[in-house]
């Protein structure tokens, strides 16, 4: 429970509970929610029963209270506005009638970690539930029109149990005030490219005689029908053109990046390197110039906005320095990971796999700059590595060995720590967030996003040796990376 509260706090997640005349259930719902989250905002939508008195007597909540009933849509707007004012990035919403189990907030948070920036929809399994025929029909009716309006089907568009990325919500000023507002939020979000992720949740329906419902079948069905008519017209005039434009810009961005890469590497850099190499041979001075060329190219691409729609940021521990040799280890997510590190210094030598070493586009440059193939084995490479570190170069290694498809930290291999031990160098941890989301594994389409690189404090060789053998050192460093990456993700994904 404490871990969930800590995660929600670090990720900027609060809970918003709108309520109207739920005096019999609101106290139990709020108390159960406080067991899951310390930041609970309750919106009293002009209740005329004991709800207001119950809430004013409770501690540990933020109460938004007004005298006239304005509807659930208005209550959600007030709750989201309060959450934004308090600095939150996400808001979990649940109903005040006891239908939703607050303990299942954990499922929505897990989905938020897996899909940062998405709108998580808690989908109810209504089979076998004693729900009214009107409610079941309304849900099927809403699901159908939502699929028509967005071309993205959802199993439950009427659920109030959701996790909203409140900084990304569009159309709040146009939101209607009643039940249909929750459908509008889904439609507007889908039109503006917010991913909608359904997550199965359990639901409780009390006996019919105990239920408190403010749904007015005739009036509310009429409002929903009018709304769906309007949304269908808007889907043709606004939603569909917006989706087409977003897709077009995504592929234009990818085409620009690949054309830039092809022209720079294959038509300019590789021929120049070939000529440079064959006129007078490759001296140490020439190799240094090639490394500076790689560094400046990487700096332009990553920091000089060579990839449109991608923002690159970085920070480092005060003790971290690239001015003296280290064994740099970094998590591996994407083809552009090397560029991220090389943007900061020309004094980095990479141990690469054979695919990079023999690449038709930049392989000649990589070989000429003395990047070394890991497949040759540590014993073979060690003399050359000692020579390079003696000249002030750091050696960079991806201890996972291969890219992570889901961006999680995979098992670390022992080679990097054996290398540090035999070279007598401290380990400098570099943690990347975002390359695997900007250019996911097994895809070649660039997504909009943010990349962040953090250089941590150097880990002294003596401290590593005290951890045990190389396997123990790898395990210890992997755990350090898991914590570092989680901390980075929790900070950055508030703006996802």
Image: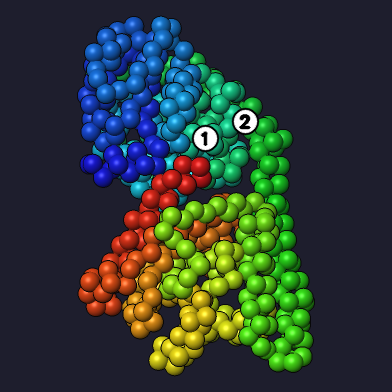
**Numbered disc 1: secondary structure:** loop
Q: Is residue 213 left or right of residue 172?
A: left
**Vertical position of residue 238 compared to residue 341: above or below:** above
Q: Nearer the viewer, residue 398 or 34?
A: 398
Residue drawn at 39 percent across, 82 percent down: 423
Q: Quadrant of residue 292?
A: bottom right
Residue drawn at 42 percent across, 51 percent down: 488
Residue 49 appears at what percent x and percent y?
30, 8
Question: Which of marks 1 and 2 precedes in the sequence?
Answer: 1
Would you name the residue on which mark 2 appears?
231
Q: Residues within 10 Å of mark 1 (few under 14, many from 20)?
A: some
Q: Nearer the viewer, residue 210 or 342?
A: 342
**Vertical position of residue 434 compared to residue 258: above or below:** above
**Vertical position of residue 287 compared to residue 329: above or below:** below
Residue 407 appears at what percent x and percent y?
44, 61
Residue 121 appears at what percent x and percent y?
42, 40
Residue drawn at 67 percent across, 77 percent down: 289
Q: Is residue 456 left or right of residue 267?
A: left
Would you name the residue on which mark 1 appears?
167
**Numbered disc 2: secondary structure:** helix
Q: Nearer the viewer, residue 468 or 59?
A: 468
């Amino acid at each position: 429970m404490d871990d969930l509260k800590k995660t929600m706090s670090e990720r900027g997640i609060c809970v918003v509970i709108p309520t109207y005349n739920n005096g019999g259930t609101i106290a139990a719902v709020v108390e159960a929610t406080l067991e899951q989250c310390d930041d609970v905002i309750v919106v009293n939508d002009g209740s005329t029963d004991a709800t207001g008195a119950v809430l004013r007597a409770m501690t540990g909540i933020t109460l938004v209270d007004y005298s006239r009933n304005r509807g659930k849509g208005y209550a959600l707007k007030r709750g989201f506005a309060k959450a934004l004012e308090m600095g939150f990035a996400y808001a979990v919403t649940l109903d005040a009638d006891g239908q939703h189990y607050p303990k299942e907030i954990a499922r929505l948070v897990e989905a938020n970690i897996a899909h940062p920036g998405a709108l998580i929809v808690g989908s109810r399994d209504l089979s076998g539930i004693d729900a009214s025929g009107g409610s079941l029909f309304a849900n099927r009716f809403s699901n159908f029109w939502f699929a028509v309006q967005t071309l993205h089907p959802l199993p439950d568009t009427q659920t109030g149990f959701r996790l909203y990325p409140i900084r990304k919500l569009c159309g709040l000023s146009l939101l209607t005030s009643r039940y249909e507002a929750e459908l509008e939020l889904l439609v507007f979000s889908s039109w503006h490219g917010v991913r909608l992720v359904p997550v199965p949740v359990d639901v409780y329906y009390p006996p019919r005689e105990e239920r408190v419902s403010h749904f007015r079948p005739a009036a509310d069905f009429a409002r929903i029908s009018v709304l769906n008519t309007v949304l269908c017209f808007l889907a043709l005039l606004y939603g569909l053109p917006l989706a087409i434009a977003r897709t077009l810009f995504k592929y234009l961005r990818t085409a620009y990046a690949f054309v830039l890469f092809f022209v720079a590497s294959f038509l300019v850099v590789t021929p120049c390197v070939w000529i440079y190499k064959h006129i007078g041979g490759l001296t140490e001075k020439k190799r240094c110039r090639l490394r500076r060329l790689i560094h400046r190219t990487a700096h332009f691409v990553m920091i000089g906005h060579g990839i449109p729609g991608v923002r690159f940021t970085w920070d480092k521990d005060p003790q971290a320095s690239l001015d003296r040799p280290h064994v740099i280890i970094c998590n591996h997510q994407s083809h552009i990971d090397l560029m991220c590190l090389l943007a900061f210094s020309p004094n980095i030598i990479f141990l690469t796999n054979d695919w990079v070493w023999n690449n038709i586009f930049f392989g000649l440059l990589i070989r000429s700059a003395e990047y070394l193939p890991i497949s040759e084995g540590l014993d073979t490479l060690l003399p050359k590595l000692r020579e390079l570190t003696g000249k002030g170069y750091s050696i960079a290694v991806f201890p996972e060995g291969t890219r992570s498809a889901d961006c999680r930290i995979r098992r670390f291999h022992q080679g990097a720590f054996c290398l540090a031990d035999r070279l007598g160098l401290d380990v400098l941890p570099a943690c990347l967030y975002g390359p695997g989301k900007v250019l996911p594994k097994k895809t070649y389409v660039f997504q909009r996003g943010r990349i962040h690189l953090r250089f941590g404090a150097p880990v002294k060789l003596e401290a590593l040796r005290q951890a045990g053998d190389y396997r123990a050192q790898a395990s210890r460093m992997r755990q350090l990376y898991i914590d570092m990456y989680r901390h980075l993700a929790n900070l950055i994904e508030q703006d996802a």
